[in-house]
Image: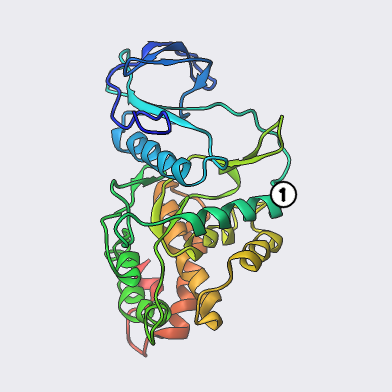
Amino acid sequence: MTEHGITDTLTEIWTPPTFSAGKVIQVVPGKSNNQEIEGDFPLDQTIIDRKAMLEGEFNSMCELYKTAPAFVPKPYTWGKLNVSNPDTYYFLCDFIEMTNQNPDPVQLCTKLVGMHQASVSPNGMFGFHVNTCQGDLAQQTAWNPSWAGYYTQLNLDQCVDRLISHVVPQVLGPLESDGRSVRPCLIHGDLWDGNIGTDFETGEIYVFDASVHYAHNEMEIAMWRGKFNKVVSSKVYLNSYLSRMGISEPAEQFEDRNRMYSVYHTLHESACHNGSSFREECYENLNYLLNKYAPFSEGECGVEDEW
């Protein structure tokens, strides 16, 4: 047990589990790692046989809760169901009934900035101690002392070679040159509309379904650029965040950094959701960045040929 009452090891068996097809799976009060669990807890809705996803989400939510306990539902444990074949895993946290209203931008961004500013990387590097997942794909979060180096290892290096070799040094390199540095910051990692909710009773905003790592804080808000967002894509959220957190120098490259960070999110999501619009959106931003920083010369293979 940790100081926050969170079980930090895998729970082999949850007793007793119940399954309800067609709706959120529920478990009744019982014990986990000999810890009494009271109340009704919805299991993570992605009940699948992928241990890494639930391990990553549990560790993500624990890290967020440790840093910002008023911003995430309290995580309790994760483990392996004893009634399924193939092996299936679960993750338990507090259940909070959410409203359908849009999150208040001032409250959301105040909490988000507070979390970003309060977070401290345990070793001063970028990454996380376990690989977390976006969708059903793992992020390669091995620790890296360089922000530009870390960004390139996030499942991108084998996909968009020209972006890595020509654009990253020009767009991310200046963040760590001329005496500047990037502070590793704890980010939620998957902060889109669907992972933000407002407590029905208190009006407090909570975030969930995280895939955290220590990164440049601007990578968090790059997801808001995505066309799949209907709420946080509004400029009021971006402006509210930046007015509190500020923009990293060189500030004139913020828009290009925002595009580049969104390329990672949309590239990753396009791999998870075949036939979606993520691929087209990623392609548009890649084209823009390559045309600006590393245009193909006549006769060279362009993005169209690679995609």
Q: Give the total of numbered labels.
A: 1
Relative depth, front residue between 256 and 215: 215
Q: Residue 283: where, in percent of width, then height? A: 47, 67
Q: Residue 163: where, in percent of width, then height? A: 36, 74
State the SS at label 1. Answer: loop
Q: Residue 141: where, in percent of width, then height? A: 30, 54
Q: Residue furthest front?
A: 3
81 above or below 2? above
Determine whether, in the image, residue 194 is placed left or right of residue 77: right
12 above or below 281? above
- Which color scheme is applied? rainbow
Identify the residue at image location x=29%, y=58%: 123
* Residue 119 makes an appearance in the image: yes
Relative depth, front residue between 151 and 33: 33
* Residue 262 makes an appearance in the image: no
The amino acid beneath tag 1 is: Asp
Residue under label 1: 104
Identify the residue at image location x=64%, y=28%: 97
